[in-house]
Image: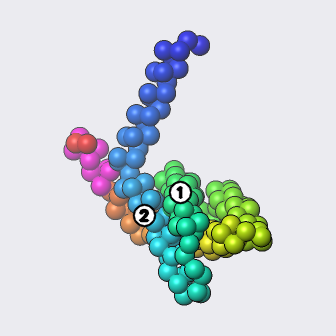
Amino acid sequence: MSLPALDTKAQDNLRYIRTTMERSSAFTAVPGWGGVAAGVTAGMTVLIGMPLNYANIIALPLLVGLGVDNGIHVVHRMRTDPQAAQLFNTSTLRAVLASGLTTVASFGNLAFSAHVGTASMGKLLALGLAISMAATLIVLPAWLKVYGSRARATERSRDVVGRP
């Protein structure tokens, strides 16, 4: 395979992803879930009295990224299989849950570090990822079930009218 052919395929894939994201209002909401999880985590640290140090501040953007990653998988599954109630019977839920739990366990192990900053970051990441998983697996599907039908109706009306 020559390099220009690979370049054309990569460009086609990027165009497809861009078009899908532009047409799907649900994809634009996914980064918000990661931000909400990071915000709720920051609030929880205040409630439980966990000090906010430099290591914890560095970990908050990581929580946003992980929340977005899990949210994309759930949104994609619900967009390809419009029956939202079936999400809990699919492998997507189990995969996102298993992935999230192993990540929580991995970062949670940092909490046992002798270094105070690393231990604090491990506690924050474990707490934040648990909150992110709850938002992704409970709140996001419910939100998509309520507001996702509006987005699909808007897409169908755009297809009929022929406007982007």
Location of residue 97 (image quadrant): bottom right
Question: Which quadrant would the N terminus be assigned to in this image?
Answer: top right
Q: What color scheme is it? A: rainbow
Which region of the structure is painted magenta? 154-162
- Could you tell me if residue 105 is visible in this image? no
Q: Secondary structure at mark 2?
A: helix
The answer to whether one can see residue 35 in this image is yes
Residue 6, given in percent of the width and then of the height, sits at 53, 20
| Residue 32, disc | 2
Is tag 1's residue or tag 2's residue first in the polypeptide sequence?
A: 2
The residue that appears at 39% across and 40% down in the rendered structure is 18
> Which residue appears at 47% of the width and 73% of the height?
39
**Rendered position, 61 above or below 126:** above
Asked which quadrant contains residue 112, the reply is: bottom right
6 displayed left or right of 95: left
Q: Which mark is residue 65?
A: 1
Q: Where 58 sits versus 163, above or below?
A: below
Q: Amino acid at mark 2?
A: Gly
Q: Main secondary structure of the magenta part?
A: helix
Which residue: 60% across, 81% down? 50
- Asked if the residue at tag 2 contacts the one at tag 1, i.e. Cβ–Cβ closer than 8 Å, the answer is no
Label 1 Cα crowd, 10 Å radius (few <14 / some 14-19 / many 20+): some
Quadrant the C terminus occupies: top left
